[in-house]
Amino acid sequence: MNAPFKLRPYQQEAVDATLNHFRKSDESAVIVLPTGAGKSLVIAELARLARRRILVLTHVKELVEQNHAKYESYGLAGGIFSAGLKRKENHHQVTFASVQSVSANLDQFRDEYSLVIIDECHRVSGDDTSQYQRIIELLREQNDSLKVLGLTATPYRLAMGWIYRYHYRGFVRGEDDKPFQHCIYELPLSYMISRGYLTKPELVNAAVAQYDFSALPQDRFGEYAENDVNQLLSKHKRVTRSIIEQVVELAAERQGVMIFAATVDHAREVTDYLPEHETALITGATDQKDRDLLIQRFKQRQLKYLVNVSVLTTGFDAPHVDFIAILRPTQSVSLYQQIVGRGLRLDEGKQECLVIDYAGNHVNLHHPEVGEPKPNPDSEPVQVFCPGCGFANIFWGKTDGDARVIEHYGRRCQGLLEPSEGKEPSEYKERPQQCDYRFRFKECPHCGAENDIAARNCHECHKAIIDPDDQLRDALKLKDAMVIRCAGISLVAEGSKLRVTYHGEDGEELNELFDLGRPGQRSVFNRIFGRRFANGQAPKAFNSADEVLELQALLPAPDFVIARKEKHYWRVQDRVFDYQGSFRKAF
């Protein structure tokens, strides 16, 4: 049967990428399409082309219903298995289901499925006991060649980083196991906006006081405790009132306004300042019937303001929304993109969507994600080229006034090496090989191999590597040892010799002399300092002391220096770089 919809070029590319991948591999895959790109059409087309049984999973009934409707628009019949929709049909070739309902009825899904499609797949965790993983494992018992495809606009989780390992453009996303193996297609938000597929977001700074959440403690996910947020907001009721006054003023010419509040108490306060007959409040505790009715009234433009707390970030589609007010803090780029995405769908007469962030989240909507937790508030995404393979990595880092990278926090190059001659780049029979260049590393004392700074065993010889904490702890116990926390280094040339002085934070000093005129000592110096030159971005083999002095500003300083007492001086024994342990504070 012919499809009633003509797929956009990028949607067809996503479908083709899926077919090509699964013809060659059973490994799980991800498609990344921005909010509003029409993921449900891609799902419908894949389901239409399928010849065997497919299960389409998502986490909210609205998306189950939406994906099912797109599929049935082809004139095909599909089943729905969702308690929220009061339907439990699993006898069709294609079943659209909520993950909660399937997980609660696993005994009804013991047939052989060929493909599982997961919409909003960034919700899949790496936990083997999660609902998604339990379903996948059950279906794999019936078919060990089961294909798993995820679709999302935001392929990362706060505690995990990227949800996949390998990207089809030739780079890798971390060294740990991920819920998905391959990203096989990705389309940036900027592409959709520049080509008129999505409405342009008009990001403006608030002209009134904003909330300052920076002093609040964060959990391991980078989020804030509700009690802490409520306590802070209770002290700033004037700020909330002035924010809502500005929102109402700016909304005069707007069609639909969504306000994302920080907590339920905060949402109620916000609602009190808005016009009563034009406003609805939806929280996780809102009755489902009431929620559906309020959303319907908002979509029909009977209501202008929709206030919510973390419940309308996915599975909600109201194209007329042209004003997003963000009053909640978040470190989640994924959540931030989902929030802004509520206002980016096209609608007749809609020119742009006004987005005002009153919570100071400082998220770059178009180039938002590095994949690792932000090391400090001043960090920004920076591009760092690998000296080994030339790959342009994106790490957290810092730049100077001329946009030059002065510091970065990357560890290992994310580039994937080209396959051997005669093999196609997309051939996954052998896992892609990640470039082994490390910007930060811990050297194995047994074989000299470079390892990740957190490694306990050498990846080459597999022998144990001395843990820096144990190294420091043992040295501190010795009467004839000195351990300093290094604040910086200074250099002095003495002919062919180079004196390195390590300055401790408490004023201590340790000295070390390298004779760069002697090949052996020159090699040691270059292994310690030259290899780490410029944060590992440009490893250098120095030939003379004068050459080192000319470039000393880019020479690395260790975090700790350990020395042992000789007869009349202290001899530097070890230097600890890129320290991550518990001795960061003073002894």
Image (cartoon, grey):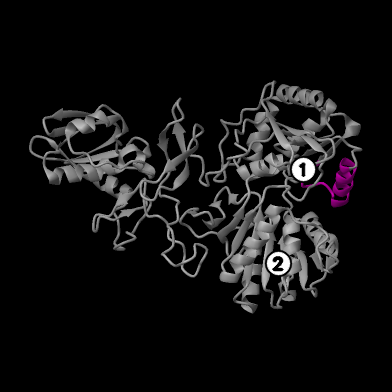
User: Where 316 falls versus 509 (above or below)?
Assistant: below
Mark seen at residue 12: none
Residue located at (60% from left, 36% from top):
363
Graded by Cα atoms within 10 Å as few (under 14), some (14 to 19) or many (20 or more), the crowding at tag 1 reads: many
Mark seen at residue 345: 1
Residue located at (54% from left, 57% from top):
168
**Left or right, 500 with reference to 358:** left
In the image, is residue 266 part of the stretch drawn in magenta? no
User: Where 566 falls versus 21 (above or below)?
Assistant: above
Residue located at (59% from left, 50% from top):
157
Residue 240 x %, y %: 73, 26
| Quadrant containing the C terminus in the rendered view | top left
In the image, is residue 298 part of the stretch drawn in magenta? yes
Q: Check contact, mark 1 vs mark 2: CB within 8 A.
A: no
- Report the magenta stretch's main SS: helix
User: Where 283 falls versus 107 (above or below)?
Assistant: above
Which amino acid type is marked by label 2?
Ser
Q: CA distance from mark 1 to mark 2?
A: 32 Å
Which of the two labelled residues, at mark 1 and mark 2, occupies the earlier sequence position?
2
Element at badge 2? helix
User: Where 112 falls versus 73 (above or below)?
Assistant: below
Residue 486 x %, y %: 29, 34
Q: Quadrant of residue 307?
A: top right
**Which label sits in the foreground, 1 or 2?**
1
Which amino acid type is marked by label 1?
Arg
Q: Residue furthest left?
A: 567
| Quadrant containing the N terminus in the rendered view | bottom right
Residue 488 x %, y %: 29, 31
**Left or right, 508 with reference to 571:** right
Mark 2 lies on residue:
103
Report the magenta residues as a range. Answer: 282-299
